[in-house]
Image: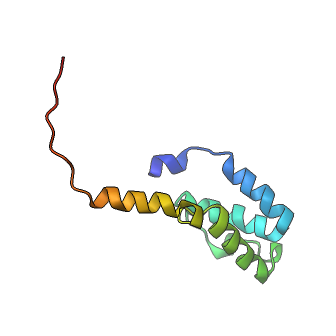
Amino acid sequence: MKNLRAIPSKKPDKHSKRLKRISPGAAYLYRAVIIPKMQEKTVNTSEINMDAFEISDIETVYRYCGKNVAVDRPENRVLYELYDRLQKTAPLISQTKFL
């Protein structure tokens, strides 16, 4: 999982652009806080420009990520249910024949 997070992706740029249209402050928070945290980096509040966003931008980023970025968003519920069922199912014992 760590290795997958290290792979550069164009998706953060896409989300950043979308957030910038909603609110420049929300886009800043996404770039300065969310992306580094997804990469398991430390984010110090002393490094964040508190003048770059409004308090309402925090809620904006939270809602945006819940609908568009989070793995457990409603669109993925079916995948979670399938994963749960597969995980709870005991593996079948079968014989494998090689040619």
Q: Which residue: 52% across, 60% down?
A: 40
What coloring was used for the rendering?
rainbow
Write down the quadrant of residue 20 in the picture: bottom right
Asked if 8 appears above or below 96 in the picture, the reply is below
Q: Which residue: 75% across, 58% down?
A: 16
Quadrant placement of the C terminus: top left
Asked if 57 appears above or below 74 in the picture, the reply is below
Which one is in front, 17 or 84? 84
Q: Is residue 93 left or right of residue 42?
A: left
Q: Which residue: 76% across, 72% down?
A: 49
How many numbered marks are there? Answer: 0
Write down the quadrant of residue 60 in the picture: bottom right
Asked if 98 appears above or below 80 in the picture, the reply is above
Which one is in front, 83 or 34? 83
Residue 12 in the image, given as x and y percentages of width and height:
68, 53
Q: Is residue 60 left or right of residue 24?
A: left
Write down the quadrant of residue 63 in the picture: bottom right
Residue 36 in the image, given as x and y percentages of width and height:
61, 60
Q: Which residue: 65% across, 67% down?
A: 67
Q: Residue furthest bottom?
A: 55
Residue 7 in the image, given as x and y percentages of width and height:
56, 44
Asked if 76 appears above or below 91 in the picture, the reply is below
Which one is in front, 74 or 46? 74
Residue 14 in the image, given as x and y percentages of width and height:
74, 52
Q: Is residue 24 left or right of residue 58?
A: right
